[in-house]
Image (spheres, coloured by chain):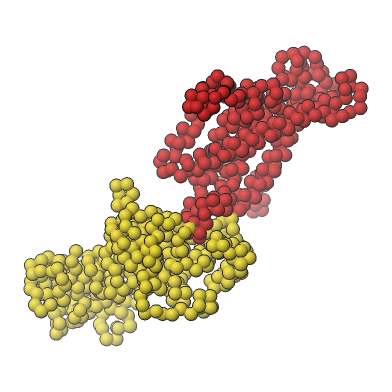
Chain colours: A red, B yellow
Amino acid sequence: MAGGAASGGSASTDTYKEARNWLLLPAWVYLGVFVLIPVIMMLVYSFLTKEFRGGVVWEFSTAAYDQFFFDRGLFGDEPAKIEWTYITIFWRSIWQAAAATLLALAIGFPTAYFIATRPERARPMWVFLITIPYWVNLLIRTVSMKFMLRDTGPLNDVLIGIGLINDPISIINTNFAVQLGLFYSYLPFMVLPIYASVERYNFSLSEAAADLYASKWVTLRRILLPAVKPGVIAGCILVFVPSMGSFLAPDLLGGAKNFMIGSLIEEQFKGNAGNWPFGAAASMVLLSMVLIILMIFARQQAKAEKEVS
Amino acid sequence: MLSLIKLYGEVAMSESREIAIDVRAAVKRYGDFTALKTISLSIYDNEFFTLLGPSGCGKTTLLRMIAGFEDVTEGAIFLYGDPIADLPPNKRPVNTVFQNYALFPQMTILDNVAFGLEMRGQSKSQARKAAGEMLELVQLSQFAARKPSQLSGGQQQRVALARALAPKPKVLLLDEPLSALDLKLRKAMQLELKHLQRETGITFIFVTHDQEEALTMSDRIAVMSAGELQQLGEARDIYERPRNMFVADFIGETNLLEVSVDAINAGRATCHLGGGHELSCNSVEGVNVGAKVHMSVRPERLFMSEGPTDSEGLKGTVRENIFVGTDISTLIDLDDGPKFIVRTSNSDRGNKRIFEPGNEVYVNMEMEAARLLVD
C-alpha cells in the first residue's frame, strides 16, 4: 500500500490499486464488524461492574481482573494472595492444547507426507477423504467420541474382545480423553498446511542427501523438516489456538476435574450464575496469551520461510 | 585445477582395464511398461563414459539404477566386483551431480559441500576444512558463506560438482548437469569436466541427449533408444561406423539414402539409388544381394566438381547454399534421384569451389565415406 513510487504509477496500476481496495473492502468490513467490535466490547465489559443474574452495571471496575489473579478471602477484606484456581485452569488449557497439538503433529505429519507422495492424480481424493468426517457437526462428533471411549463403549469392547485387556480402561473424564477430543477436532488443520508444504518440496533433495550417505532419519531431520517447517508451524498454530479456547471437548470428555479456560468463560455467560465482566476479563487474558504465542510462532515462521527461500 | 593431483594423489594411467561398473542383463519395468530392456555393459575404471539418447530412451533410468534411486527389476549391477543392486543409495560409494543440482537451500555453500564428508563420519571441522579446499578447486571460495539461491546457475553447477566429488566417490554420476547452462558456459564446463576427470582419475558416467557434447567429452559412448542399447564404442567409431539407422541419424548430420544392393564383390557392394545413379562401398555383414538397405554418407566427406572425376560422380543441380559459420552446406538435387547435403569447410575454400544455386555439379565421395546400415 505504501508503495513509495516517487514517479507516480501509470493509469493502469492506479486502476489496479483502486480495484484492489474495493475488493478488500468486504474483508475489512467483516473483520471490523465480527472481530474488532466484539473484542472492543469484551475489553469494555471486562472493566465494568457485574449485575447479579447476568449482565453489567455501567460503572468502571477492575474487580474482574482482581478476581482472576488475587484471593482476598471470602469477604474481600484479607490481604491479597495469588489466586491459583484460575491460573491453574489456564495452565491446564495451555498444557492440554499443547498435548493435543503434539498428538496432531505426530499423526498429521506422516498422513500429510503420505498424501503428498501419492501420484498427483490421487492426491485430491486423499485430501477429500481426510475432510469427510468434518462434514458432521463438531458437537455430534464429540458426543460420538464420548460414546466410543466410555467404559462400556465399542473401544473397550473390542480391546476386551481381542483379549488385550481384561477390565475396561477408563479413558473418559481424563486429561487424555480431552487431548484425544481436541486432536480429533482439529486434525485437518494440521494435515492440510503440512501437505501443502510437502507437496512443494523438491524430493531430489532427499535423493541428494541419500546419495551423500545420509540415513533416512538424518535426511528427515536435516533436509526435509527444515524445508517444510513453515507448514508445520502453520499447522501447530491452527491446532493450538482453537484447542486452547475450546470448551466442547473438555466439557463432554473431561468432566468437572478437567475444566479448561473455554469452559470457564462459557460458564460466565450461561444462565444466572454468570459473571459477565469476569468472563470478559478471562477472555482478554486468553486473547493476550494467544497473541503472545502467535507472535513467537510468527517470528519462527518468518525465519523458517526466509531459510527455505 | 592442478592442485587436484595433490588431493587425489598421482593418478597412474593404468593400462589394465579394471571394470568399474558392470551392468549385467539389467531390466527395469514400471508395471506393464518396460523402461529398460535387458541392458548389459561394462564401464572401465578411469573412463569418461557417456549414456547418450533422446529423452525417454532409458539413459537416466539406468543412471538412477546405478545410483540406487531406482531398484533393478531383473539382473545385477557390480561396482568393482561387488554386487550393489540391493544396496540403498547411502551405502553406495558413488555420488551424483543432479540435473537441477539439488543443493540444500537452507545450508551455506560450504555446508553443502561438507555434508557428504560429515555423513561419512568426519567431524564437522574436518569436513568443513576439506570442503573449503574443494571449493577452492572450483574457484568458489569467496561464496562459501552464501546460500545456493544467491549463486548463478553456473556457480550452482560447480557447487553441485564440488559436493559430489568431495567424498571421493569411486564413480561419479552426472545427470545432464550442463543442460541448464547457456551455450558458452556449457562449452567451457565441458572442457573443465573432461580435465577434472583426467586429473582425479575417477570414473565419470555422464548422461546427455546432446550428441555433440557426448562426442566432445567421452572416451566411450553408449547410444540408447527406446530402452535398448543401440551401439557402444569410442566416439570416433560411433560417428564413422554407425551400426544402424538410429545411430547414424542421431549422431551428427548425415545423408540417409535408400539403396538396393546389386552385387557384392570382394567385400565391395555395388548399389543403386534410383534415377540410374550407382555407387559402391564396403559391404557389411548381414547385407545380401538384392536387399534394400539404408546408406549413410556424412556430408563433410562429399565434395563437388564441375565435371565427372575418377571416382563415381553423381550428377545433380545445386539448390541452395547455407552458411553455418565454419562450414557451408550445399543442398543438391540429383537428376531423378535423392537429395544430398554436401558440407564444405570454409577453410577449404581455396581448394574447393562453392557452386551457386542452379549450377550443374557432380557429387563425389571419399573411398570409405559411404556406409551400409543393417536396420
Q: Kindly indicate the quadrant of the structure image that contains residue A67.
A: top right
The answer to whether A46 appears left or right of B62 in the picture is right
Image location (x, y in percent) of residue B35: 32, 54
Regarding residue A209, the answer to whether it shows in the image is no
Regarding residue A54, the answer to whether it shows in the image is yes
The answer to whether B132 appears left or right of B350 in the picture is right
- Which residue lies at the image location 82% right of the left edge and 23% below the top edge? A48
Image location (x, y in percent) of residue B71: 38, 54
Does residue B142 lie above or below A266 as drawn?
below
Does residue A88 lie above or below B219 as drawn?
above
Image location (x, y in percent) of residue A273: 75, 15
- Which residue lies at the image location 45% right of the left edge and 57% below the top edge? B89
> Which residue lies most toward the bottom here?
B351
The answer to whether B10 appears left or right of B22 in the picture is right
Q: Kindly indicate the quadrant of the structure image that contains residue A193.
A: top right
- Which residue lies at the image location 73% right of the left edge and 28% below the top edge? A89
The quadrant of the picture occupied by the C terminus of chain B is bottom left
Q: Kindly indicate the quadrant of the structure image that contains residue A250.
A: top right
Does residue B289 lie above or below A233 as drawn?
below
Q: Nearer the viewer, residue B152 or B87?
A: B87
Image location (x, y in percent) of residue A111: 50, 39
